Image: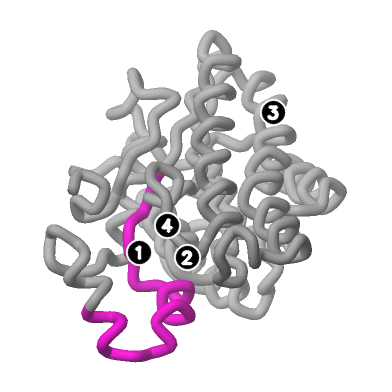
Amino acid sequence: MSLQNNFKGKVVFITGASSGIGRATALAFAKEGASVVIADVLTDEGAQTARKVEELGVRSLLIKCDVSKDSEVKSAIGKTIETFGRIDFAFNNAGTEGQSAYTADTTEENWNRVIDVNLKGVWLCMKYQIPQMIKQGSGSIVNCSSVAGLIGFQGSPAYVASKHGVIGLTKTAALEYAKSKIRVNAVCPGVIQTAMIERVTHGEAQIQKQLSDGEPIGRVGQPEEVAQAVLWLCSDASSFVTGHPLAVDGGWVAQ
């Protein structure tokens, strides 16, 4: 079913849109007629996303933005409003997995970096997105958590804590702004075929097989499958859904 009536002529702000789930979501919105703001530290890859968006016949805006820095997020939202006059949808997706280590072996530097990007970054984005959406009288925000926001994983304490935090932050903001006609939800991807997973597997077929075997559905997911969940959460089809962490995980957390 086409969602074009929901998105044509609208504006979506996406962090971490240079590749993977972010890029797939940018293209999914573009296919439905939305203008796309690509906010990312990786501007060369972000420019590739922007070109792909424009090839679909809609406008794009590429902004260099480190989501862990208040001034850069504030500036990115300001440029978006200056260019398009509004922000209808936001996908706060930028994230990092950090270094793998058990809790007692995790460095303070790694902890701070992961929390700053994955959790503080989501908060900063909402801090500047929400006032514009209040002014407009509507808006839909989707934050990227993870199955690691729903269950624990050994060796990733900072990542797991950050993704659990995203869900708590999502629920709180959803309650705070429900009467302002702003919906706030989260997606919780399972194992998705992205560069992050490739870094985890180091390209080793056996590790990749273990991840696939761990999914009840029998395979890893694709970025486009998460993108479709984000579009649904932003669409009028989910108008009664807010404060919800949606698992897109092939059944991983149902085990």
- 1 or 4: tag closer to the N-terminus: 4
- 4 or 3: tag closer to the N-terminus: 3
Q: Residue at x 20, y 55 (%)?
A: 250
Q: Type of residue at label 3?
A: Gln
In the displayed orientation, state which residue is furthest to the right: 71
* Residue position marked by numbered label 1 in the rendering: 223
Task: Report how far apart the C-alphas of labels 3 and 2 lie in the structure.
Answer: 24 Å
Asked if residue 50 lies left or right of residue 121, the reply is left
* Residue position marked by numbered label 2 in the rendering: 23
What label sits on residue 197 in the rendered view?
none
Q: Secondary structure at mark 3?
A: helix
Asked if residue 230 lies left or right of residue 208, the reply is right
* Residue position marked by numbered label 3 in the rendering: 132
Point out the frontmost of discs 4 and 2: 4
Q: Position of residue 202 (x, y in %)?
A: 43, 87
- 4 or 2: tag closer to the N-terminus: 2
**Callout 1: 10 Å neighbours few (<14), some, many (20+)?**
many
Residue 173 seen from this side: yes
Proximity of marks 2 and 1: CB atoms separated by less than 8 Å:
yes
Residue 94 seen from this side: no
Q: Secondary structure at mark 4?
A: loop
Q: Where does the magenta region start and end?
A: 187-209
**Callout 4: 10 Å neighbours few (<14), some, many (20+)?**
few
Q: Position of residue 171 (x, y in %)?
A: 50, 25
What label sits on residue 153 in the rendered view?
4
Question: In front here: 173 or 152?
Answer: 152
Number of dots carrying numbers = 4
